Amino acid sequence: MIEFSYFIACLFVIIVSCIKVLHVNSCAEWPELFVNGAEFTWRFTSDATNNEADSTSDDSFVAQILKRAPIFSKPYIPPLIWGRSGHLQTVIHSTFSRHKTPRVKGDSRHTLFLSDGSMLTFDLFQPPTGAVSTEDVTLVVCPGIGNSSETVALRAFSHHANSYGYRVAVLNHLGIIPSIPLTTSRIFTYGSTEEYGAMVNKVKEMYPQSKLIAVGFSMGGNIVSKYLGECSKQRANFVAGISCCQGYDILKSLEIMGSWKHMGKAYLRAICVCVQKVLHNFQSVLLSDEQLSRFGIQSRMELLYSLNLVHLDDILLSKMAGYSDYREYYRQSSSSLYIPQIDIPMLFINAKDDPLIPPEMFDTPLRHTEVNKKAVFVVTKHGGHLGFYECQEGSKFFQRGTFTWLDKAVVQYVGAVVFLASAVRPQLRKQERK
């Protein structure tokens, strides 16, 4: 009897621990929308499809955007059992990604050379004939760290956008695809916009009449935001910008992740391994004796097997990018310095349970909504870092969908902002000028 009671007690502790760790009792909620520095609210009519902006909001442009993107006025419901955990959403996204991802058709790879001789590539995914959109729209996508056009999640997103008639251009970060050689001793950085800008210029050259939407995921969100804020000329042809799960201030973000709170150190080590993989794949170019001597590095093994990302950035990557140390590198690479200069419509999306980007980092987009009347900051309760898997009716507990809530949210926003920018809506634009 005592043994049975002990078993029941242990089972109870395990169940309670699982509920606490997985946040199973955490309820799904509507996304929080911030406009003009304050939370945006909806007033529902008897017809659930007709949401009206609350009278506390006087920004007609944003109100019209949100009315045409209904996903933001409905609860985001993550999968049962595991979907309430930001850690599991993040890990599943980075390891297993999507379920039954369709093959993207109409893709082609393009090659460019930068001013220093670095060879850059990007992939174009064309929409199928007869797709929904009547506008010529190109989503110019910058992936996150370690990702490229060959990443399953990016392929799934491109397929979803293509199905709505949007062309998608995806940047391949320098050094990420092993089969694409490095022609100089240079790899991607956290904030360099030269590669993204080169792709944008080529897309403009190929499709001069196309409406452009800048889309960035994680590190890519930092890069596209920085690009849009650096120079007003760079915003020509851009209808809007979209940033998903970026950290805004790299130095502050890594300082927060430097503790074991939210398991930050574990994620930093995972990022460190990703960078080391690039260094290992291209040792002959990046870690030659000449390179090591140039930066005063004694041991090649120190770079390849270090578990400290900040140390790796300090002794090598910051120097390769032309900075004196990691602090200057992080500070100058952060989009938070440039976002205030953006004056086109912007959508920022973050999740409260993102273990890499906690809510302490949300001040930059919130402040931007105060000065940019066409900016929206969306915060979800769940989603993790780029996870945003949905609970699909009739699906198994552990089954992942092909497309995530984030995929759908981005594409719906694109449809809304393109609609309002179209020549067939002159009245709305006239109201904005008043």
Image (cartoon, rainbow, N blue to C red):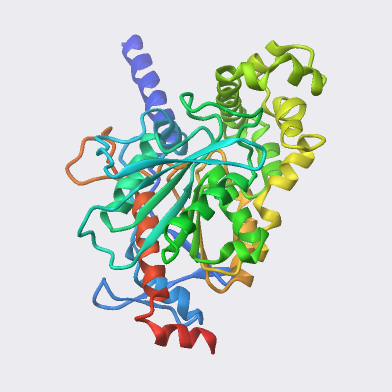
Please state the total of marks drawn on the protein image. 0
At 47% across and 87% down in the image, what residue appears? 431
**Extreme-bottom residue of the structure:** 434
Side of 422 relative to 370 (left or right): left
**x, y percent for residue 295:** 80, 23
Q: Camera-side residue: 164 or 32? A: 164
Q: Camera-side residue: 218 or 134? A: 134
**x, y percent for residue 414:** 39, 62
Q: Can residue 11 be seen in this view?
A: yes
**Extreme-left residue of the structure:** 394
Side of 337 relative to 132 (left or right): right
Q: Is residue 325 above or below residue 430?
A: above
At 67% across and 54% down in the image, what residue appears? 336
- Report which quarter residue 310 is drawn in: top right
Q: In this view, does 359 lie above or below 55?
A: above
At 20% across and 60% down in the image, what residue appears? 130
- Report which quarter residue 303 is drawn in: top right
Q: In this view, does 374 lie above or below 27?
A: below
**x, y percent for residue 267:** 56, 30
* The N terminus lies in quadrant: top left
Q: Camera-side residue: 390 or 294? A: 294
Q: Is residue 72 visible?
A: no
Side of 119 relative to 32 (left or right): right
* The C terminus lies in quadrant: bottom right
Q: Camera-side residue: 248 or 120? A: 120
